[in-house]
Amino acid sequence: MKSLHLVVLAASVIGAQCATAQEFLIRGATVHTASAKGTLKNTDVLVRGGVIVAIGAEAAAPNATVIDAKGKELTPGLFGGVTDVGIEEIEGESQTVDSTLNQKSPAWEQQWRPELDVTVAFNPRSFVVPITRVEGVTWTVLAPSAQDSIIGGQGSAVTLDGRYDAALPGSRSLFVQMGSTGARVAGGTRAAEYMLFEQAIHEARNQNPITQGALLHAAGREALNRYLMGGRVVFQVDRASDIREVVSFAERAGIKPVILGGDEAWLVAKDLAKANVPVILDPLNDLPIDFDRLASSLENAARLQRAGVRIAFSSGDTPQARLVRQLAGNAVAHGLPWEAALAAITSTPAEIFGVGATHGHISVGQSADLVLWSGDPLELSTLAEQVWIAGRPIEMKSRQTELRDRYVEKVKAHQAR
Amino acid sequence: MKATSRVALLFSTALAVSGVLAAEPFPSTYQVPVNAPVLIQGATVLTGTGERLEGTDVLISDGKIQSIGKGLTAPAEARIIDAHGKWVTPGIIDIHSHLGVYASPAVKGLDDGNEATSPVTSNVWAEHSVWPQDPGFEMALEGGVTTLQILPGSANLIGGRSVVLKNVQAVTYQAMKFPGAAYGLKMACGENPKRVYGSKNQAPSTRMGNVAGYRQAFADAQDYQQQWDKYHRELAEYNKKKAEHADGGAKKSKDKDGADKESMPPSPPKRDLKLETLAEVLKGNILVHMHCYRSDEMATMLDVADEFGFKITAFHHAVEAYKIADRLAEKNVCAAMWADWWGFKMEAYDGIQENLAIVDFPEHSCAIVHSDSGDGIQRLNQEAAKAMAHGARVGLTVPPERAIRWLTLNPAKSLGLQDRIGTLEAGKGADVVIWNGNPFSVYALAEQVFIDGALSFDRAHPTPSPRSDFLLGRHIAESPL
């Protein structure tokens, strides 16, 4: 019967929404702002025109629809990590996957394609989108995966409210694969990654490009050049020595680096803090799963945070992008302060990807991407009760809830415990 | 002398094949360690039998649970653990692990989980691939896992024998092997076998090819068993006649030629390791654990099992088990599930987060949380917790005292070990986990883990060196000069 209650709640919210020109007041929630203001108890959040316009006690809003949120907790919409939500339906069925440009040739013989941008392949009608957002995940960063290349191409942050033009302005980034994975495609040694990358940079900067054996087309040179003037480049790399090398390489190249993976980042935490390089990691990675990750540790997140490194969380798993809360909760169990864990799935990734002015916090002027939770948002017994994106309530349904409803009724009708 | 020893050899072979295992190969060398008694005091105890007991003591001695109750008296030499505010559960059992066969680091040299050279490899045994130094074992222990079933992978229709291990530090797998545990047989439905062999332009390349493959294998096993049955009949006849000859020996001794002919024993069939394993399945001595995502394929396999007269103990990765929850309960078949894995391939597309709660709902159900993952096995309690939350939302509330059975009693049942592990009851093996809080919280950690009464993991006092030889030297390499 609980399910029925929730459906009614969702329906009434949607109905009320249409009637009142997008003005509503979430009343009396515990508000986790993911900003310097921290957590505010018994607080009202007023939303108008898709934007948060007031936060406080007993906000005055005579025309607003009031949503009673007493005993519930409110967070910003969650970051689903660096994923392929909307560009991959089923990993095992290649015709449904748009995340990879597979060149089928060695990296040194390829035309490098930094101009590729997977954002244009995003399909907001993907079933994965509602399945992900009903769990409180309102945005993700699309990343091309560099299967047989070093540069995978570009991707962007996208909102998951179902709109076609979903990219968040200012979030476009270049994705690069280094370490032993990159070494394999570069010809067998990670030294060749830097050799080839230096060559590409040289081509991009050169006014008179070479014609024989060039890595880049004109469009590629233009695209890469944009990143050589302080652009954001996400390097997928795990080994401590590789992380240090990437940071100094980026500095020489005029690139603003972000580390993705970073299983051994805690070993070079001081260097990362000093260079102000953020790390997007999976805090559950603790297996020495390969020789790049022998020092993987459940305390990676806590140690990085203590050293002053900005951290965000990502499992990189597309169907399970919804599990970011579990990553954050486990990081807390292994020493990360709760507020830092919430920031790692809200405000910090928003800042890393250049959308912090509009996304990631609960503060006046931010897009009203909000999630109302039944309890502690990092706890496993807690579920999202209502999700709003840009001030619009999301219908709390997906293909999976429809499957659920069909078969729950069947088993209940047939059995009584 | 020569003839006698040959007969003795044949005789022992016959015993092994007929299921009377005179000398089982690769025997367990595990010994229950000797330890002082342990009294855990004042905990919230989830017994695994469906009970939740507050402020309760658990007394362990001689490797067994001695008693459970309030205000138990500690034996003189007992170690006393104050567990007020803590939760105590049976040791967690994962019936689907590839630790040791797909070890960390995941390099080619340790890639030993799939004998993907033929769709039926019931002759291979997972234990011969287990690397006891896999660091994943100790990480699973830190998550409270005390018993695991290691399976071959799912490339093949019939992948080989599983092995049940105790999660103890050892140099050999024999020293981890759960004494007296039955073997399992790994089988696989669906996409994996048809993809692996179809891509080699070999059978099976379709689901109908899969089913033809299982049926032919078991038809061959029936034939093989009939050959052995025939041999045993003839041998018995021969022995009987020989005994009669011995009685009336003087009378028949004249007919020298005839007597010689009659004294020739029947020749046993050649042992076939593939069919030997399948014959043991037909006799119910080996338990079938079958990787099967889709409900329609599970239904097909229940019919195949009926056709050949064997039982499927558990469907693993049963992503669609919720569609046939009643049928599984009626047939007394367990379903081992993830909490929420879905969508990574077509046969996983209908995964829902209420699967465990729905499968658990019918009477006589057997819902199990499994991992199939070196990561997931460290947090099986959290997998259960997520399923509980989603079940509760649709009115299928599963309290902690019931949910713990998904990780303990139900997997023990599917291994045929429910009389030895899986609950905290007097007389059972003392596999016990002390948690620092409700184990279904994301913040909960296992503080102490006992295996047969031996403290195997202690979070407050971690052993200075890792259990795995592989991890030695790591802290030296990590320290800067």
Image: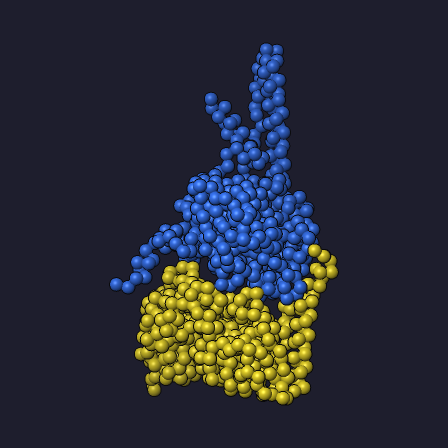
Chain colours: A yellow, B blue
Q: B418 or A60: nearer the eye? A: A60
Residue at image coords 52%, 58%: B439
Quadrant of the rendered image containing residue B155: bottom right
State left or right for residue B269 relative to residue A404. left
- Residue B105 x, y percent position in the rendering: 41, 57
Q: Is residue B254 above or below residue B354?
A: above
Quadrant of the rendered image containing residue A278: bottom left
Q: B329 or B77: nearer the eye? A: B77
Q: Is residue B341 visible?
A: yes
- Residue B392 x, y percent position in the rendering: 63, 64
State left or right for residue A208 relative to residue B177. left
- Residue A339 x, y percent position in the rendering: 46, 73
- Which quadrant of the rendered structure holds the N terminus of chain A? bottom right
Q: B478 or A59: nearer the eye? A: A59
Residue at image coords 68%, 81%: A15
Residue at image coords 58%, 78%: A28
Callout count: 0
Residue at image coords 59%, 62%: B387
State left or right for residue A206 relative to residue B348. left
Q: Is residue B463 above or below residue B224?
A: below
* Residue at the limit of the structure toward the right, as seen here: A413
Q: Is residue B336 visible?
A: no
- Residue A97 x, y percent position in the rendering: 54, 71
State left or right for residue B37 relative to residue A399. left
- Which quadrant of the rendered structure holds the C terminus of chain A? bottom right
